[in-house]
Amino acid sequence: MTERAASSCLAGQGANGRTLLAGEPLGRIGTMVVRLACSAAEIEAAQEVRYRVFREELGNRAVAAGMQDRRDADRFDDVCDHLLVMDTSLEGPDHRRIVGTYRLLRQESASAAGGFYSSDEFELDRLVARHPHLRFLELGRSCVLPDYRSKRTIELLWQGIWAYVNHYDIGVMTGCASFHGTVPAAHAEALSFLAHNCSAEGAWRVPAVARRHHPMDLMPTEAVNARSALAAMPPLIKGYLRLGAKIGDGCVIDHDFGTTDVFIVLPVETISARYINYYGAEAQRFAA
């Protein structure tokens, strides 16, 4: 953990000139609260939650190969903000109340780190270059402990993300989302639905890097049943689609993490009005 991550409790000054304190609430539902990590202990606790989900539950090899102390960590953690969902009804210090986490990498921080995490799989840098007047935010490492995988927890995460997006005047949200397993054909209908109906086009098109590109249109349009395709999709991807997200060109097999990855492109201006109205009140309340 670097000195920056260990000592900083400031997420930074936003477009409104206000400094967002990393420990202040960005949303609350009952005993659950969402906020940014404020200390090295909280970041390390979030990495432990990621380890429990990615390694112990899903068996991802990348964690086993690169981790010590039962934490999922990489070089990007030190330049990211870490969104935390905490259950305040649990006993112990705050860092032991973390039940869910999301990693947030702003464009200026990515530049300091030498690029975005997703750039190893998708041509994100070219997308950013085509939109020089928009601020990009990469979301990743999303996970929630099994007992807390509910609509309420997902809503809290999005309350936090929306407050953060508004604070920093983010124009585009991006990031990888995953299907479990490394055989795209096992998800042929869902991937084909995405390819035929949800592809990012024109200036928003983002292909997988050529050496890792796998086709997604594995079934013809007429063979895809939309209802069963959507039912087979991971909840995170369905959540993005409800907000109005589009999908990159091609999928990528991540053998270390045991996943088939697709790329999410979500310009803020295209988010459905009903979701802006739904989350906007909380964003205004907590990050005005």
Image (cartoon, rainbow, N blue to C red):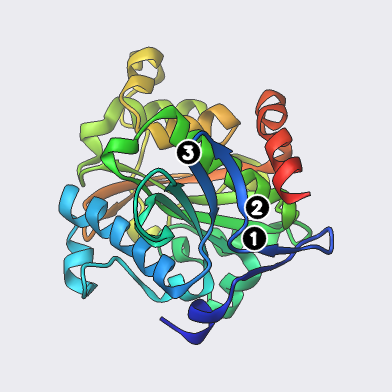
Q: Secondary structure at mark 2?
A: helix
Could you tell me the amino acid type at mark 3? Thr
Q: Which residue is mark 1?
A: 128
Q: Dot 3: few (<14), some (14–19), or many (≥20) neighbours within 10 Å?
A: few
- Residue 274, given in percent of the width and then of the height, sits at 68, 23
The image shows residue 90, relative to residue 80, as above or below, that is above
Quarter of the image for residue 236 reads top left
Q: Which residue is mark 2?
A: 164
Could you tell me the amino acid type at mark 1? Val
Q: Assign the N terminus to one quadrant of the image.
A: bottom left
Give left or right: position of 9 versus 269: left
Disc 3 versus disc 2: nearer the observer: 3
- Residue 120, given in percent of the width and then of the height, sits at 41, 65
The image shows residue 194, relative to residue 41, as above or below, that is above
Give left or right: position of 195 versus 71: right
Front residue of 150/234: it is 150
Could you tell me the amino acid type at mark 2? Tyr
Q: Secondary structure at mark 3?
A: loop
Q: Which residue is mark 3?
A: 31
Front residue of 249/144: it is 144
Is residue 58 in sight in this rendering?
no
